[in-house]
Amino acid sequence: MSLNIITHKGIEYTHNQLIETMKKKGVKLKIRDYQSLFRLRSLPAGTYIFTDRERLDHWQLRACGRLYQALSEYPEYYKLYNNPAQILSKHGMLRQLFRTGINPFDCYTVTERTAPVRYPVFLKTEYEHKRPIGGLLENKSQLHDAIHTLSKNNFPLDGVIITEYFSKPLKADVFRRLSSYVIGQNLSFAGAVHEKNWCVKYGQHSIVGDEEYREERQMIDTNFRSEEIKKVVNLLNIEYGRVDYNVVDGKLAIYEINTNPHIPLYKSTNPNPMRNANNKIIFDNYINYLAQIDYSPNKIFMPKLVVKIKETLARH
């Protein structure tokens, strides 16, 4: 069995640690990078997951699109997920979700020079998954000054987006972000992250207790908001990744979809035993669903495809 996750050189750490775990499930997991992929003469048959669309430049997107199309002509040999040419940019996703009425907030590119309708807002780049650039900007003047500072410091404005902030604390000064994994046709709740920061990223230990973790367990058991999230990923052509979101006053708000999420091995390191138990269920669910999309055809590769790959890359 062969399951291939394609990412960028230097970003393999997101899934590398799963190789031994998947081996125990009878799945040969291989992490490939786009740079090496484009130099291959042929590809072994199996499952291929394309990730990190936002880190692909235009040339790479075109090459991936043609390669995906060539592979898709042989479904008996290749099972494909996340067509890079059909996935929108981060800005494109958020704008689509707003215009279809799914998201209650809008976003803008800095270069389109459109004034936000709602404040506060924050700045973030389209091509990575780091924290926002600076803090919340409360009005037009603060936004103007922040953009001016970036430009003055020679920070490229192309690819910087302005997003209207839409969230509220879970309690007191604690904020929460929810996540769900998309793995083929399956959705699996990926847990809650808590921080004393308006932008929840990595989480902090011991700032919530049993009440919150009991609620998290219920979300796991019910696969929280899975029907709504399924509609979102179908709209955006996402077949693998992690959806980050929140529910504010009963309204679902999709913040980001990361097609190359970091999947850490399960470790019982949280001081709360209930949280450790939840994390174990979340990890096991992910591994089981990932194993399900593995594909093992009888032949190693399609000889005809060798020429198509070479022709595809030659045209670029």
Image (cartoon, helix red, strand yellow):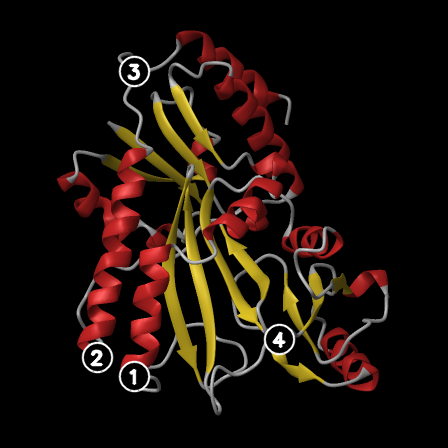
CA distance for labels 2 and 1: 8 Å
CA distance for labels 3 and 4: 46 Å
Query: Which residue is the site of mark 2?
Result: 272
Tag in front: 3 or 1: 1
Query: Which residue is the site of mark 1?
Result: 209
Find residue 192 and report its horizontal and vertical position in percent. 39, 69
Query: Which quadrant of the structure image shows residue 37?
Result: top left
- Asked whether 226 or 180 is in front, the reply is 226
- Dot 3 or dot 4: first in sequence order is 4
216, above or below 59, in the image: below
Query: Which residue is the site of mark 3?
Result: 300
- Dot 2 or dot 4: first in sequence order is 4
- Do labels 1 and 4 touch, CB within 8 Å? no
Query: Which residue is the site of mark 4?
Result: 133
Query: Which quadrant of the structure image shows residue 33?
Result: top left
Provide the secondary structure element on which disc 1 rests: loop
- Dot 2 or dot 3: first in sequence order is 2
- Do labels 3 and 1 touch, CB within 8 Å? no
Question: Which residue corresponds to the image point at 85% horizontal and 71% vertical from the top-left?
Answer: 115
Position of 57 with respect to 206 (left or right) is right
Neighbour tally class for label 2: few under 14, some 14-19, many 20 plus, Cα within 10 Å:
some
